[in-house]
Image (spheres, grey):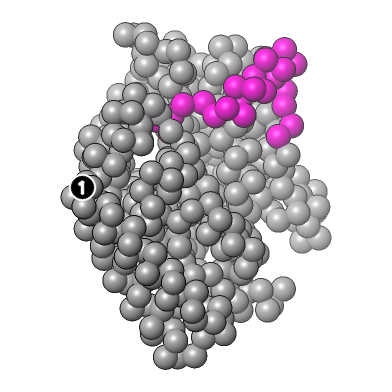
């Protein structure tokens, strides 16, 4: 590994020198783009080969032989320091964040290579996935105040504890709860607080009331990924696309691992979750529903996963939707962009109850009461083991990290986000 490590660093340096001699990506001629692509491709071939041969050794070095659990961002930062040329440095990423998506060099693809190979290793990948179940430092810092008051306003998400229920409300009324890096952080913090709180028996997620002219005064669950943020280059592979799946969504499904937990009884803290879809759940919103224990929808609501239309991959939806809805309906939803309305028969594969708007609140409270049973958590865990093992999830995420990184910088995606920006 030592020789390969030195060779990779030298190759990466030569590639950077070659790119630095060219104009900025948006100013390059066709020939200059070909030169840049060939240089990047050659170095990425070396990175992939290096990680395929040494993924476990790399991970062991970064985590002190798996004694330390690092967040995704911490792991990427440590790798940039310990293995020059393997992943982009903080300065490279900062420079990329300062320009629109179409004007980037695409250094996040190197992060995709790195994480896909780590996740592909049963040893390193399993430890990595489990490490992401730790409560975040932000949640731990806020917990004492939250526990005392039973509430916290995190910015884009509010959490309130009432009678044993943690009620999480997504409140980005400026963008119909479209997700960006900020909301991912707020959601994970809120999920951590709910799971850490011993007074909480069951958790509820619902969209708040909007101020958008078209939906003023109505609740909206989620409009999916924030396309404005995607165009501007503010949707990151590590802090959004990977953290979202391995962080708060996985925690809703599998619970959290408190740092001081060594109980032989239960290494994770898990709770049942209910989701309420008012109006619509688009993209990431629809993905979320697939990990909830009970989903209630308004009769005029709809669900859709337009990721293929946008040019990206809808998280772990392909893994979970096929199991819930079957292969035919899943292809219609993901590949063809079919919109499923709550009132149609096929929606019964995706939601548990459908009610008129005025009946939703009562249905929610009845559902929360049903999920308070003392045996719910144990049976919930057994259902999850039957539906999706942690190892199956790890293998899916290994391929997702690779493919999603490539999609972010594909010509069709860059063209779409550019046209979106022009239209706004």
Picture coordinates of residue 288, whole percent (x, y) = 49, 44
Q: Is residue 335 above or below residue 289?
A: below
Foreground residue, 223 or 185?
185
Q: Is residue 231 above or below residue 116?
A: below
In the image, is residue 2 part of the stretch drawn in magenta?
A: no
| Circle 1 Cα neighbour tier, 10 Å, few/some/many (<14 / 14–19 / ≥20) | few
Q: Is residue 47 above or below residue 277?
A: below
Foreground residue, 121 or 322?
121
Q: Which residues are magenta?
A: 130-154
Picture coordinates of residue 108, whole percent (x, y) = 45, 59
Picture coordinates of residue 417, whole percent (x, y) = 57, 72
Q: Which residue is mark 1?
A: 1
Foreground residue, 240 or 53?
53
Identify the residue shown where x is 26% and y is 59%.
Answer: 7
Q: Say if residue 338 shows up in the picture.
A: no
Judge left or right: residue 146 versus residue 332. right
Judge left or right: residue 21 versus residue 401. right
Picture coordinates of residue 49, whole percent (x, y) = 22, 58
Q: Look at the image and tell me in which quarter the C terminus lies.
A: bottom right
Q: Main secondary structure of the magenta part?
A: helix
């Amino acid at each position: 590994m030592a020789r390969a490590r030195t060779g990779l660093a030298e190759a990466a340096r030569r590639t950077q020198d070659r790119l630095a001699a060219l104009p900025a990506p948006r100013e390059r001629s066709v020939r200059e783009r070909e030169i840049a692509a060939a240089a990047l491709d050659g170095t990425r071939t070396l990175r992939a080969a290096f990680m395929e041969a040494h993924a476990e050794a790399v991970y062991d070095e970064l985590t002190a032989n798996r004694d330390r659990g690092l967040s995704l961002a911490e792991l990427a930062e440590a790798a940039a320091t310990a293995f020059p040329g393997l992943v982009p440095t903080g300065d490279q990423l900062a420079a990329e964040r300062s320009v629109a998506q179409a004007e980037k060099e695409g250094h996040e693809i190197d992060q995709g290579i790195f994480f896909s190979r780590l996740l592909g290793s049963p040893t390193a990948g399993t430890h990595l996935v489990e490490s992401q179940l730790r409560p975040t430092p932000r949640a731990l810092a806020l917990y004492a105040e939250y526990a005392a008051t039973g509430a916290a306003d995190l910015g884009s998400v509010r959490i309130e504890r009432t009678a044993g229920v943690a009620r999480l409300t997504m409140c980005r009324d400026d963008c119909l709860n479209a997700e960006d890096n900020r909301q991912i952080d707020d959601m994970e913090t809120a999920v951590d607080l709910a799971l850490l709180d011993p007074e909480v028996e069951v958790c509820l997620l619902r969209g708040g009331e909007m101020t958008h002219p078209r939906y003023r005064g109505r609740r909206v669950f989620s409009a999916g990924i924030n396309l404005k943020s995607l165009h501007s280059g503010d949707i990151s592979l590590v802090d959004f696309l990977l953290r979202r799946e391995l962080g708060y969504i996985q925690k809703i499904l599998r619970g959290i691992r408190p740092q001081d937990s060594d109980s032989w009884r239960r290494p994770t803290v898990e709770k049942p979750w209910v989701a309420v879809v008012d109006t619509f759940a688009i993209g990431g919103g629809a993905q979320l529903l697939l990990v909830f224990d009970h989903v209630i929808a308004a009769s005029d609501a709809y669900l859709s996963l337009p990721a293929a239309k946008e040019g990206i991959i809808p998280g772990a939806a392909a893994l979970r939707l096929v199991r819930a809805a079957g292969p035919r309906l899943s292809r219609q939803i993901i590949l063809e962009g079919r919109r499923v309305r709550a009132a149609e028969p096929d929606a019964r594969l995706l939601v548990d109850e459908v009610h008129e708007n005025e009946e939703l609140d009562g249905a929610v409270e009845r559902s929360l009461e049903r999920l308070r049973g003392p045996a719910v958590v144990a049976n919930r865990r057994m259902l999850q083991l039957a539906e999706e093992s942690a190892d199956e999830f790890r293998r899916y995420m290994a391929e997702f990290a690779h493919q999603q990184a490539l999609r972010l910088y594909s010509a069709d995606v860059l063209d779409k986000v550019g046209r979106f920006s022009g239209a706004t």
